Image (tube, helix red, strand yellow):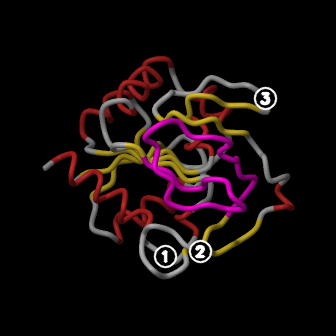
Amino acid sequence: MTIGVLALQGDFDAHRRRLEELGATVILVRKAEDFDHIDGLVIPGGESTTFLKLLPKNVLERLRDFVHTKPTFGTCAGAILLAKNVTNPDQTGLGALDMTVERNAYGRQIDSTILTAQTKLGSEPLEMVFIRAPRIQQVGEGVEVLAERDGYPVLVRKGSVMAATFHPELSDDTRVHAEFLKLVKNGTA
């Protein structure tokens, strides 16, 4: 199984290391043709508007097609990009997940935090690292909430698309990435 990690900005290398630790082959995606060689894609955190500015038109078009047809996992800014609706300020998303996301909803960098919460990924609490995190304000029909913070979804899934408003690559817990690899495996089986 070969997983692409969008490698324009953000901590894409932490995702690469985690995925390799779990046995995946990883390609750092920077060009449109990179999409031809991957079974799934991770869109890391960073700055969502910067992603949109850095993406060449042909890569953005391939990304838009990919997220609607293949397993994709977005964290923080990646979750914002996957959303159907983005606020604070309004921004175009890729529309892969029917959800409304508010950018920087938990405050500035200084307000970043590490929390633990129960999830549907096992009985042990999951450590979640929030850095200038977005907040999922609402989810559409069929979007499964896997974890919450203060009553708001922070880890969601629909079909072969997952999104987290936190940074699972910065935790020692591998369950979130392992869950994404299950989606990819199911999609390629």
Residue 189, x across and y down, in percent: 13, 50
Which residue position holds label 2? 127
> Magenta part mainly helix, strand or loop?
strand
Quarter residue 67 falls in: top left
Which residue position holds label 1? 173
Q: Residue drawn 49% across and 76% down?
A: 173
Q: Amino acid at mark 2?
A: Glu
* Up-down relation of residue 109 to residue 89 (above or below): below
Q: Residue drawn 62% across and 23% down?
A: 92
Q: Earlier in the sequence, mark 2 or mark 1?
A: 2
Direction front: furthest residue: 141
Q: Amino acid at mark 3?
A: Pro
Q: Earlier in the sequence, mark 3 or mark 1?
A: 3
- Helix, strand or loop at label 2? It is strand
Residue 119: within the magenta?
no
Q: Earlier in the sequence, mark 3 or mark 2?
A: 3
Asked whether the residues under the numbered discs 2 and 1 touch, taking CB atoms below 8 Å apart as contact, a structural biologist would say: yes
The magenta stretch is: 130-157
- Helix, strand or loop at label 1? It is loop
Residue 140, x across and y down, in percent: 52, 36
Residue 180, x across and y down, in percent: 36, 56
Asked whether the residues under the numbered discs 3 and 1 touch, taking CB atoms below 8 Å apart as contact, a structural biologist would say: no
Rounded to the nearest angstrom, the CA distance separating label 3 from label 1 is 32 Å
- Helix, strand or loop at label 3? It is loop
Residue 36, x across and y down, in percent: 25, 33
Which of the image's four quarters has the N terminus?
A: bottom left
Q: Which mark is residue 89?
A: 3
* Up-down relation of residue 20 to residue 164 (above or below): below
From the viewer's perspective, is 146 left or right of 152? left
